[in-house]
Amino acid sequence: MVEVDLGDVKVGKYAFQGCDKLKELKMAKNGITDIAEGAFENCTALENVEIPSNVTDIKKLAFNNCTNLKSVKLPENINSIEDLAFARCGLENLEINSGTIGYRAFWLNQNLKNVKIGNKVSSIESAVFEECKKIETITIEEGSTLTVPSDNWGASNATVDKK
């Protein structure tokens, strides 16, 4: 399976788990409001995902261990990214504009270098960036009320730029 066009189909828990030939994922801009728990876990060939604006919640383990996932475009109005949602992926850059971010949501993204956090992100759980050793900068948008913990959410070597 090289490409899946989901259209308006609701994807259940672990629906595509382990589809190691899935490279591209397209979702309609209406219909789907969440990405289910483990829906694309272990889709190791998946490279790019653009999540449409109608998706407001990304459930736990949704893209866990998608080791070739280099790029994800998150909607601006996301409500939540749950625990381990993008753990063990290959993300290089990340921009999160809003919502809450669960425990270890981006854990072990070993290629992640730059993170931008919008001022509508209301909370970030601990260890979100643990084992993301290449993170150079975490930029927090002006107006944010987030308090940065001493370990920078697990990215202890990163520089935090709170504008």
Image (spheres, rainbow, N blue to C red):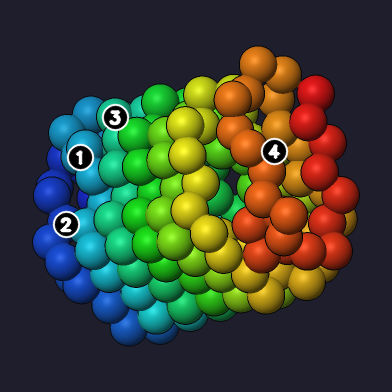
Q: Secondary structure at mark 1?
A: loop
x 51%, y 24%: residue: 120
- The CA distance from mark 3 to mark 2 is 14 Å
Up-down: is 161 above or below 105?
above
The residue depicted at 16 percent of the width and 57 percent of the height is 11
Measured Cα–Cα span from mark 3 to mark 4 = 21 Å
Q: Which residue is mark 1?
A: 32
Mark before the other along the chain sequence, 4 or 2: 2
Structural distance between the alpha carbons of marks 4 and 1: 26 Å
* Residue position marked by numbered label 3 in the rendering: 54
Q: Is residue 149 left or right of residue 60?
A: right
Q: Pick whichever of labels 1 and 3 is earlier in the sequence.
A: 1
**Which image quadrant for residue 36?**
bottom left
Q: Which residue is mark 2?
A: 11
Mark 4 belongs to which amino acid? Lys
Q: Residues within 10 Å of mark 2 (few under 14, many from 20)?
A: some
The secondary structure type at the circle numbered 2 is loop
Dot 4 or dot 1: first in sequence order is: 1
User: What residue is at 13 percent from the left and 47 percent from the top?
Assistant: 9
Residue type at mark 3 is Asn
**Percent position of residue 19, x then y:** 33, 80
* Residue underneath mark 4: 116
Q: Residues within 10 Å of mark 3 (few under 14, many from 20)?
A: some
